[in-house]
Image (cartoon, coloured by chain):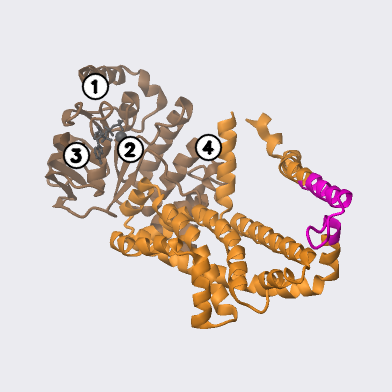
Amino acid sequence: MSSNRPRVGVLGMIKGFSFSWLPSLLIILALLALWEGYVRIFDVQKWLLPSPVVIAATLVESAALLSRHAWVTLVEVLVGFGLALASGVALASMIAFSRTLERAIYPFVIASQTIPIIAVAPLLLIWIGYGLAPKVIVVALIAFFPIVVNMVDGLKSADPDMVSLMRTLGANRRDIFMKVQFPSSLPFLFSGTKIAMTFSVIGAVIGEWVGSSAGLGYLMIRSKPQFLTERVFAAIVVLSAMGILLFLFVGLVERLVIPWWHTERRKRALENSG
Amino acid sequence: MNAEAAESSIQPAIQVQGVSKSFMQSGTPLAVLKGVDFYASDGELVSVIGPSGCGKSTLLNIIAGLDQPSEGSISLNGRVEERRLGEVGYMQQRDLLMPWRSVLDNAIIGLELQGVSKSEAHARARALLEEFGLTGFENEYPHALSGGMRQRAAFLRTVLADQEVFLLDEPFGALDALTRSQIQEWLLGMWRRVQKTIVLVTHDVDEAIFLSDRVYVMSSRPGRMKLVQVIDLARPRHAEMVTQPRFVELKAQLLASVRSEVTDV
Ligand SMILES: Nc1ncnc2c1ncn2[C@@H]1O[C@H](COP(=O)(O)OP(=O)(O)OP(=O)(O)O)[C@@H](O)[C@H]1O
Ligand SMILES: [Mg+2]
């Protein structure tokens, strides 16, 4: 119906944007104000709980320090995530391609998540030493799981009638995989990737806590015994900003790679709403 | 083409002989087809009508090679063929357009699988866009198309793959009456031009008569062919023909046959 059009126009988008972001922005501002007020009224010590204004000042003063360590963490996150993505897609493809491979591989994929990463990380340190490698491995170990699980589900979600159609057109297993199963799995892969991206940031910090000489995790661990609590908070702010930006980046890539998914979903939503 | 021609030395494009099929359903075998005999001559348009669940789609699945019969055989051009996948074009009731491909890329999937280069395949598809009423929509994703357009895009995909036989399973089921009668006339024009053998499954007796050379009526499950009716209406056919005495007469016969089955269910 043409009378429905304006709802998805520019006005609708602005409306949608403010409706989705305004509440969370208001909540954050209110919480920050409460926090600031509490610290000032009760005169809480800076090393116990720094106020938002103090943390903001630290962010500015220590910008160089923070960005140096943030860079180290970012590299660990991206390399580890890349490894997780590559191995996750490869494993999921193998699992979905053959029953035998599924039975052989899937138990190990699941078992890998039952291993407490905190316990393994120090061992990695002993085996491979300090530096980038052990952190990358911790990141990859945490991040590959949501990728594999989601992508396997996605590959299996392919429409069986579409597979039949391909077969009547003379397609072989490989054609069906590449032209039906793989594209069908992409929305699932991106869901898994968004989870994996945020897990990666956590993984990098864990890796740094266990043993490192740089990175935001390292900075936190070093600042705490020096009672530089405002610096710990500043590192957390940078870390979560990094996580949010990476998450949004994945969303952006998703929109570029599978534009059909969003239009399809919006159409379905419109149909359901009337 | 008529029944006598098929009995001559020319081999039918499709011949189904004594085909039975049963499925296991919760441990017990369910007989879906029982001794189906059926043929379609080269260039013929044959319809199959029958009550819901009588095994029409099962029969098409078997002809296409997606499934094998429990008993009986299928011959293509006079030779018994066990491996029929890729030989027979099959358009299922759902259009099965891939949401991640543009209309043009959906249309060329068959050519792509045959190893035709993308530019060549696109050129062949573009040449037919106008005839299929898809001009200006070739770069859209399928969700932007109306039901009738989606159906025509699926047709274009089938036509471009260029197999000798097209099996169409209720291709107009999802369309409203007006679109439906337009696309029926359009299909006839298309069929005359491409000279393919078409097997059409439908629920609609009018549609079967209007389009076909012969109409098969299937019994309720387990399905078998209970009646074959030659449609001796002149071609080309026009929408006004549905009021002609011969059309009405044929319709009465076929409806009686179909109705006696439906009440049995
Ligand atoms: N793979 C299968 N496994 C088990 N039962 C099946 C299978 N395929 C079809 N059937 C059963 O066979 C019967 C005939 O199904 P089929 O789809 O061929 O009917 P149809 O004549 O095409 O019906 P409709 O007109 O509703 O499309 C149904 O009862 C169905 O449940
Ligand atoms: Mg059916």
Q: Residue at x 40, y 62 (%)?
A: A111
First in sequence, mark 2 or 1: give its number.
2
- Residue A113, x across and y down, in percent: 45, 61
First in sequence, mark 4 or 3: give its number.
3
Relative depth, front residue between B145 and B191:
B145
Chain B: colour as depicted: brown
Residue range of the region highlighted in magenta in the rendering: A28-54
Chain letter corresponding to the colour orange: A
Residue at mark 2 to residue at mark 1: CA–CA distance: 18 Å
Assign a secondary structure to mark 4: loop
Give the residue pinned by disc 2: B169
What amino acid is found at the position of numbered circle 4 in the picture?
Answer: Ser
First in sequence, mark 1 or 4: give its number.
4
Mark closer to the observer (1, 3): 3
What amino acid is found at the position of numbered circle 2 in the picture?
Answer: Asp
Q: Which mark is residue B258?
A: 1
Give the residue pinned by disc 3: B23
Label 2 CB less than 8 angstroms from ligand 2:
yes
